[in-house]
């Protein structure tokens, strides 16, 4: 994560902070999200010698994701958000396979999933989520808190 932090600093971002070792980074930037995404993807391509997808959310957007969680009454470690680059298709959940008790809901650019038996035991597959990245609600809430810091 130190390398990721250094890449962000080198890209001109400020107040850079990483969270757990899964590619989560919070920072300030004065440039548009599309330019942030492009800059990070270029840095990661140079570092890894292969494309690495990046999902970008503003502090307000990540706070909105926390508020939009339709499964707030469930244990946060069993509820995940799949972050996507674009709005998921309206029929995205109709194409889910391997459903066994999981609850799903669409967000603005996310898919919310509650895994009552844990994500590791699930055989759930949602084609629209294949190019996304998932984080549990504990992580999402922590990232929102870090992003909200003055």
Image (tube, helix red, strand yellow):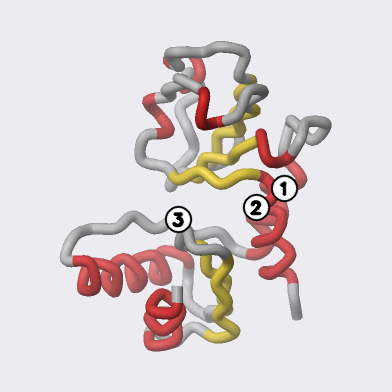
Q: Residue at x 83, y 31 (%)?
A: 73
Q: Is residue 32 above or below residue 90?
A: below
**Looking at the image, is mark 2 or mark 3 earlier in the sequence?**
3
Instruction: Find residue 129 and report its image quarter.
Output: top left
Q: Position of residue 71 (x, y in %)?
A: 74, 31
Q: Residue at x 51, y 19 (%)?
A: 93
Q: Nearer the viewer, residue 59 or 80?
A: 80
Which residue was labeled with disc 2?
140
Q: Is residue 34 above or below residue 140?
A: below
Which residue was labeled with disc 1?
66
Which residue was labeled with disc 3?
55
Disc 3 crowd, CA 10 A, few/some/many (<14, 14-19, 20+): some
Q: Position of residue 10 (x, y in %)?
A: 38, 88
Relative to residue 24, is residue 103 drawn left or right? right
Asked if the residues shown at circle 2 and circle 1 are in contact, with their CB atoms under 8 angstroms apart, the answer is: yes
Asked if the residues shown at circle 2 and circle 3 are in contact, with their CB atoms under 8 angstroms apart, the answer is: no
Q: Residue at x 45, y 13 (%)?
A: 98
Disc 2 crowd, CA 10 A, few/some/many (<14, 14-19, 20+): many
Q: Which element carries disc 2, helix, strand or loop?
A: helix
Q: Position of residue 131 (x, y in %)?
A: 36, 40
Q: Residue at x 44, y 79 (%)?
A: 2
Q: Which element carries disc 1, helix, strand or loop?
A: helix
């Amino acid at each position: 994560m130190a390398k990721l932090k250094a890449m962000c600093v080198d890209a001109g971002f400020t107040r850079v902070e990483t969270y757990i070792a899964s590619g989560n980074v919070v920072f300030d930037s004065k440039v548009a999200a599309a330019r942030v995404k492009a800059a990070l993807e270029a840095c990661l391509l140079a570092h890894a010698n292969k494309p690495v997808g990046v999902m970008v959310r503003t502090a307000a957007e990540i706070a909105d994701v926390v508020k939009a969680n339709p499964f707030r009454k469930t244990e946060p470690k069993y509820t995940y958000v799949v972050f996507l680059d674009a709005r998921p298709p309206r029929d995205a959940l109709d194409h889910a396979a391997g459903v066994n008790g999981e609850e799903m809901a669409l967000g603005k650019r996310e898919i919310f999933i509650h895994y009552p038996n844990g994500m590791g035991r699930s055989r759930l597959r949602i084609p629209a989520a294949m190019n996304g990245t998932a984080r549990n609600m504990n992580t999402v809430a922590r990232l929102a808190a870090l992003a909200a810091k003055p």
